[in-house]
Amino acid sequence: MGKLKEEHLALSSGIGLAGSSIDYFYEFGENAFEIFTKEIIEAIVKPSKTTAVHWYLNFFQDISSDIHNLKNNVDELEFIFDFIVRTLNEVNLKPDLPLPNFDTCTDEWHEECTCKDTFEQWEKYVIKNAAIVDNLIIHSAFQIIFLDKKFLHDFHLKLADVTECYIDDIQKQHPDFVTPKKRIKRTHFPKWLTNAVFYRDKATCSICRCDLSNLIRTQNTIHIDHIVPLAVFGSNDASNFQLLCESCNTSKGARSTTTSSINTPFWNLESIF
């Protein structure tokens, strides 16, 4: 397996986005699918590093809108400025801009002092770089959601309904990626995808939990499996895969969506109750 490159991740913002987008999915998921239908179709016919989940997250992430809403609902300029600075630090953007002197400022509402002008410089910087900020937060949120195979299972079941609805359009746009039975055609799995699934699932079969690292048992064969199968309008979206052994993959069947939410925690609780 190839080595992964270390990156700066905006995990706090990413966790917040991941949590809220999962909460809203069961009620508003279809809205995101409707807005980004074209982009999602491109992602589901063949694996892309920008997955349908990324486009779903894009529906909720908008740093410019977040700042606008804060300005309309929060009176404390210092609070909004702190949010901007924390967000920029998270995405590793460090503008060479002056800092407002809130500690010594005597203007409670910052109408006559220099704080407001300084704040606006930071606000303009964020808005100018909003696409970079949003993409990095979405990228970070995806790392969290990619771990949650139960959510990915539910996400791709709902996406399968969209695929079935649009299959005629998909066939017209991508005739080489649709079978005569009007299902998405199985495609080649790129190395970056198989590596990602292998690392995420910790070289362990998602169903029977057997070791697939070849460090303990060399007899087990690695299979990359569609969580929601192509036969039931599943897709080749890069977030619709899991690691299985040969036995589990063979017995799972062409229409089963069996997966697992079992993970290895960093430490175990002796008792929850």
Image (cartoon, grey):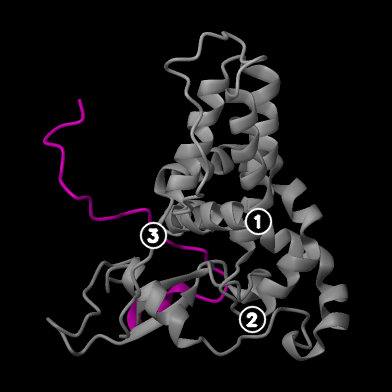
Residue at image mark 1: 131
Most foreground residue, 228 or 172: 172
Most foreground residue, 117 or 131: 117
Using the image, determine if residue 57 lies above or below residue 156. above
Mark 2 or 1, nearer chain start: 2
Numbered disc 3: secondary structure: loop
Using the image, determine if residue 98 lies above or below residue 101. below
The stretch in magenta equals: 246-273
Q: Position of residue 6 (x, y in %)?
A: 33, 69
Magenta segment includes 271:
yes
Q: Amino acid at mark 2?
A: Lys
Q: Position of residue 117 (x, y in %)?
A: 64, 29
Q: Find the distance from the CA under tag 2 to the CA under tag 1.
A: 25 Å
Q: Position of residue 119 (x, y in %)?
A: 60, 31
* Left or right of 1 on screen, residue 150: right
Q: Amino acid at mark 3?
A: His
Badge 2, how many Cα within 10 Å: few under 14, some, many 20+? Answer: many
Residue at image mark 2: 46
**Residue at (67%, 42%) from the top-left corner?**
124
Residue at image mark 3: 8
Mark 3 or 2, nearer chain start: 3
Most foreground residue, 5 or 215: 5
Q: Amino acid at mark 1?
A: Ala
